Amino acid sequence: MTPTAAQDVASPAAAPIAAEVFLRALAEHGVDFFFANPGTDFPPVVEAFARGRAGNAKLPRPLLVPHENLAVAMAHGAYLITGRPQAVMVHVNVGTGNTINNLINLSRDRVPLLLAAGRTPITESGHFGARSRPIHWAQEMFDQAAMVRELVKWDYELRLPEQVGDVVRRAFEAAMTSPRGPVYLVLPREPFSATLAEWPAPAAARAVPAPPRPDPAAIAALAGWIAAAERPLLITAAAGHDPAAVAALARLAERCAIPVVSHNPRTIGLPASHPMQFGCEPAALLADADLVIVLEADVPWIPSRERPPATARVAHIGEDPGFLRYPLRSFPSDLAITATARAAIEALDAAVAEPGVIDDRRVAARRIRLAAAAARRRDRIAAEGQPGEAITPPWLSRAIGEAVGPDAVIFNEYPVILDQCGREQAGTFFGLSPAGGLGWGLGAALGAKLAAPDRLIVAAIGDGAYLFTNPTACHWVGAVHDLPVLTVIFNNTRYGAVRRATLAMFKDGAAGADDGRFLADLAPSPPFEALVAAQGGHGERVERPADLPAALARARDAVVKERRQALVNVICPY
């Protein structure tokens, strides 16, 4: 056997290889799933899983995912259901490049993920695992992690096989420390496939610092501001990642008659039926507010369109209330409280519940005024949600909510109008990250189905986002891994965000002559329903409003009763 050939063949050994220790360490840190998009750097992983299965070792469940962007989205969805970080491994620099779109989403959404990637073999010869393919020269980079360093909290490259347990501990310590976020680990083939002299001790997770709790003096000050306010307003976007925070916010809003707006919502802020739930647009209440409480909201309003009065007090609450990783963010701030949403709102509710803090007569008068405004809002929502000559986003959003029921989990990549969908329970609605990287919704839904196989999981996405999500790969994963989800496409044959942005700036310019369709037009639209059918799923195309409820019900039943993935391609001209 030639020396080159010998480099690709391992000698039998009872001693563990580093990849085995790595996989066991992931399991010891609560990782359920190992999402893999493999390449020539994966032989140690394949060998480690084979050895682990033979020895009944506790390992994460491996899943082959044929696109890296999809793998990261699935890990995101699984985390949202379980609260436990997951692991993704991709092929060297090229695989890392394909993760970046959804990695940005995770970074801005503070989602802990261990993203691992192989590295082209370090050595050209003379070592087990050395370079053996032409790509091993072209794929080497001076600094592979530089591609993602701005997006992750920590990165490291494995140097010695004995390090692997400590490296995993450090990775999860970084990922799970508040505010949470993804980390990146580079695994060159030589140390990753090398043997250790003996099995190391289990890689027990390190204790991470407790999440921040609010400063009592700051809470007392804000409670006093609430007591003095005539027109308080609370704006949130992502407080509902913790269901207990939703319950606490419901108590505070009811006690003090504070209207709550979920601007650009990623989670449920308040149940839809709560009397202080005031939708998703802050403008009407913001214009005359005298106190604005911003709770886990990176962009509470759009300053070029609306802003609070100059005399209004503004308080920001969150694990990073200043969003310091955003290069420019200039919202006014008179008080900043670093705390989790739950801890801050529970403390604030306790403070305003103290005898004599709140003027009950003032709150009662405000409650009456807000009740009238809420009734007008409900009437408007009901009128907008009626079927017309064509299917509209409000009618489609309402029909989805009615078809899937209150317990379904909806992953919304832009189009669902939350006011129409009527979500009552925390954990039943998740929106796209504020970074807006497309190709997230269907993958996140698949990951959620993996983590919650008995739940009805729904992906609501636009046709442009569906094209972006690598639908063939998604439906293959749904079929192969038995992950039946319901996909509803809001098909307007265009990139709506591009068109709206163009018309907002140049409606009266040359770009407005074709209604802003240039570089936004996705016509002719392919038969998306055929893509899911090719993988054995249920697919329908719907054009008439009257046909929509029955089509959604058939698709729901295909998922729930037949355990088949389903897709409804809804022609929705807006």
Image: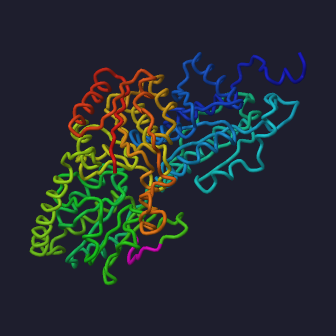
Could you tell me which quadrant the N terminus lies in?
top right
Image quadrant where residue 133 sits: top right
Measured along the vertical axis of the image, is residue 366 above or below residue 175?
below
Tell me the magenta residue range: 330-336
User: Does the magenta segment cover residue 188?
Assistant: no
Q: Main secondary structure of the magenta part?
A: loop
What residue occupies the far right of the structure in this picture?
A: 2
Asked whether residue 331 is drawn in magenta, I would say yes
Question: How far from the left and from the top, in percent, is residue 527?
Answer: 42, 32
| Residue 287 picture location, percent across and down | 28, 75
Name the foreground residue: 161 vs 272.
Answer: 272
Residue for point 32% across, 26% down: 559
Depth check: give the residue in front, 441 or 106.
Answer: 441
Q: Quadrant of residue 434?
A: bottom left
The part of the image, by quadrant, that contains residue 189 is top right
Q: In this view, which residue lies farthest toward the bottom?
A: 311
Q: Nearer the viewer, residue 334 or 370?
A: 370
Q: Is residue 134 left or right of residue 479?
A: right
Is residue 78 something that shows in the picture? no
Left of 38 or right of it: where is 248? left
- Between 194 and 47, the residue placed more toward the observer is 47
